[in-house]
Image (cartoon, rainbow, N blue to C red):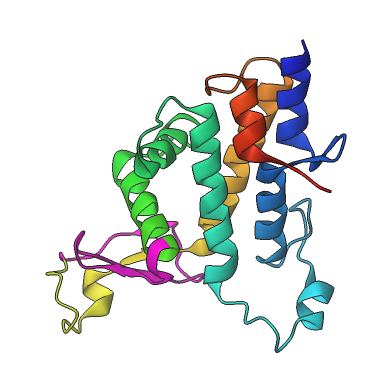
Amino acid sequence: MEDRKFIESFISQKDMGERRESCLIIALQNARILSRRDKDGNAFNIDFCEKLDGVIEFEPFIGLVNYLLVLDMLGAIFTDKKKYVGERIKGILNIYGKMKEDEQKAISKLRNCLVHNYGLADKDKKIKFILDSSCSVMIQYPTKNWDGEYSTKDDDATSTTINPQILIEKIEEIYMKIKEEVMDGGLNHKLENIEELKARFTIINK
């Protein structure tokens, strides 16, 4: 019973009591704020952005990276895919996002590019990305394969275009679906035990 209360607290609130905080909710709230939302994710926090004018450039990168880390964390906790980050992300996107395999691969590769290099190209995987909030779909695939040469100039034809706002909404939907299943008692963590969850994904605020 205590384990059930703990996982429900972890998935739903930052302050879990006794100075313990949920790293998942910290990451999610940070992602929301850095994507011009309030901490509940429901509205654009324009006042916050105006106060930081000139301090932080609100490019799509800064919030999206945090959202992709949230996706990775959800995969680590709520799927059996433990070995590779890509497997965890694709598992979450498949189970809770109902996304196709090519969509899962694209988002997993985008995460790697952003987190590893804070960039949008991976020569080894021969993939390049463009972030475009005006794109009418979440993922628009290239019309031809990139050859992996950085000197290749036809970016529009060889790049995978991602609409970061649609992707962020999708990650929010996935989080809400997981949260609802946990709170309804139909989903538990897939870690070895509750102590692993405490050690890896919560902090004690002193």
Vertical side of 150 occupied by 116: above or below: above
Viewer-closest of 12 and 171: 12
* Region rendered in magenta: 116-145
Q: Main secondary structure of the magenta part?
A: loop
Residue most extreme to the left: 147
Residue most extreme to the bottom: 54
Q: Position of residue 58 (x, y in %)?
A: 62, 77
Q: Position of residue 55 (x, y in %)?
A: 70, 85
Evaluate whether residue 13 shows in this view: yes
Vertical side of 97 occupied by 59: above or below: below
Residue most extreme to the front: 206
Residue most extreme to the top: 1
Q: Position of residue 39 (x, y in %)?
A: 78, 55
Q: In which quadrant will I find the N terminus?
A: top right
Looking at the rendering, which quadrant does residue 15 occupy? top right
Viewer-closest of 166 and 182: 182
Identify which residue is drawn at 49% across, 71% down: 134
Vertical side of 184 occupied by 64: above or below: below
Identify which residue is drawn at 37% across, 50% down: 108
Viewer-closest of 61 and 130: 61
Q: Position of residue 141 (x, y in %)?
A: 28, 60
